[in-house]
Amino acid sequence: MSDKEIQYLIEKLKNLEEEYHKLRELYRRLEDEKRFIESERIRYEREVRRLRSEIERLRSPPLLVGVVSDVLEDGRIIVKSSTGPKFVVYSSQYIDANELKPGARVALNQQTLAVVNVLPTPKDPAVYGFEVEERPNVTYQDIGGLDAQIEEIKEAVELPMLKPELFAEIGIEPPKGVLLYGPPGTGKTLLAKAVAHHTKATFIRVVGSEFVQKYIGEGARLVREVFQLAKEKAPSIIFIDEIDAIAARRTNSDTSGDREVQRTMMQLLAELDGFDPRGDVKVIGATNRIDILDPAILRPGRFDRIIEVPMPGFEARIQIFKIHTRKMKLASDVNFTELSRLTEGATGADIKAIATEAGMFALREERTTVTMMDMIKAIDKVLKKESPIPDLKGVMFV
């Protein structure tokens, strides 16, 4: 065999080897694609099965809603249908018999009216909105001049939740509720915010006027559902701000609105100290008008602690000024004792407004330091007396 033929064969062998490697690479790629397609096929089959089951579920006949009236000895149930009449029906074997109690809401098969499911108790969506999700950032250190009140609310609300064994050991029941009363702006709501911050309990905040509803029975239902939510999420605290909106002294008024408010208050009285145990649920009420509250709500057993939140005294005003100015840059001439003397009769809310207004005076002059003069101007502005109405006689308007 000549050298030329040998060279030709070698070249052909190289070409065949390259073709082999290309085919091998193609084979590997096709194998990968095959595995991917197989996995996709399995995934799509699973999705098709899920969609078919969803279609079957949507095609199933709708269920009726009923309420259990009674449970018979042979296991049958008397159910009042949402359409009106009562029926004696059987229940599914997969339902716990302990859940089928009188008053329970159940789902009924439309054809046989058999009980196929137990439904949860309905709650107004507004009730879930009362729950405070984000804790207020107010601490007890942010409250000035109310040391005695803070100590009392800690004993009545926090201590029974943190150390219930102490009350059991001494043989007394912990306080069930606390009522805060005092002039506006003295720190009642601030105390409640601090309790919400420091306790790990569920905090539910309601304004008394939110219980006043348009239709008969709606307000009482809201009260009942708020306490039911608190029991489900116990340990919990219910804070009712402006409680005088629904707990004013009962009168002989004949208007339907007043009678409905009184019905709501009666439900509140029953929840505060009724036959049903409250469990680990504490109630804090706040009002500016304790003089108009009904005596029934003030008795021990409903609000065991009635705490007055008074106007701040001389030393208390100094503490409040220090709290509201601790993040401000103050000049050396700022004298808290003098500021407290100038703000006789001011509330904590007034002092906070004074500190904010003093900062605004400094900003207007493009300063970052607040001086004593800024404070005095702010006091004059916030605590100013009502200006007399000017005499406009003889004034010519253009």
Image (spheres, rainbow, N blue to C red):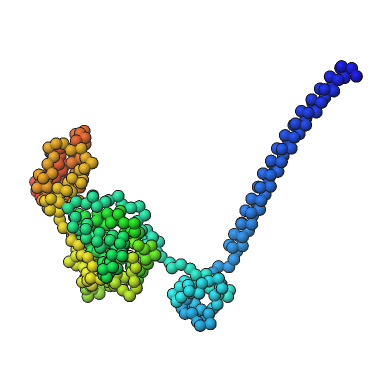
Place residue 29 in its image quadrant. top right
Q: How many marks?
A: 0
Q: Which residue ends up furthest to the bottom in the rendered image? A: 73
Above or below: residue 2 compared with residue 187: above
Place residue 46 in its image quadrant. bottom right
Which of 96/210 is in front? 96
Q: Quadrant of the N terminus?
A: top right
Q: Which residue ends up furthest to the right in the rendered image? A: 1
Q: Can the viewer see residue 389?
A: no
Above or below: residue 284 compared with residue 377: below
Give x and y (percent) for residue 275: 33, 75
Q: Can the viewer see residue 334?
A: yes
Give x and y (percent) for residue 294: 22, 70
Q: Which residue ends up furthest to the top in the rendered image? A: 3
* Residue under the point 36% across and 63% down: 234
Which of 105/389 is in front? 105
Above or below: residue 84 compared with residue 288: below
Residue 56 vs residue 161: left or right?
A: right
* Residue under the point 21% across and 45% down: 324
Give x and y (percent) for residue 178: 24, 64
Residue 90 vs residue 334: left or right?
A: right
Residue 56 vs residue 193: left or right?
A: right
* Residue under the point 53% across and 80% down: 75
Q: Quadrant of the C terminus?
A: top left
Give x and y (percent) for residue 335: 12, 41
* Residue under the point 53% across and 82% down: 74
Place residue 12 in its image quadrant. top right
Q: Which residue ends up furthest to the front in the rendered image? A: 169
Residue 224 vs residue 57: left or right?
A: left
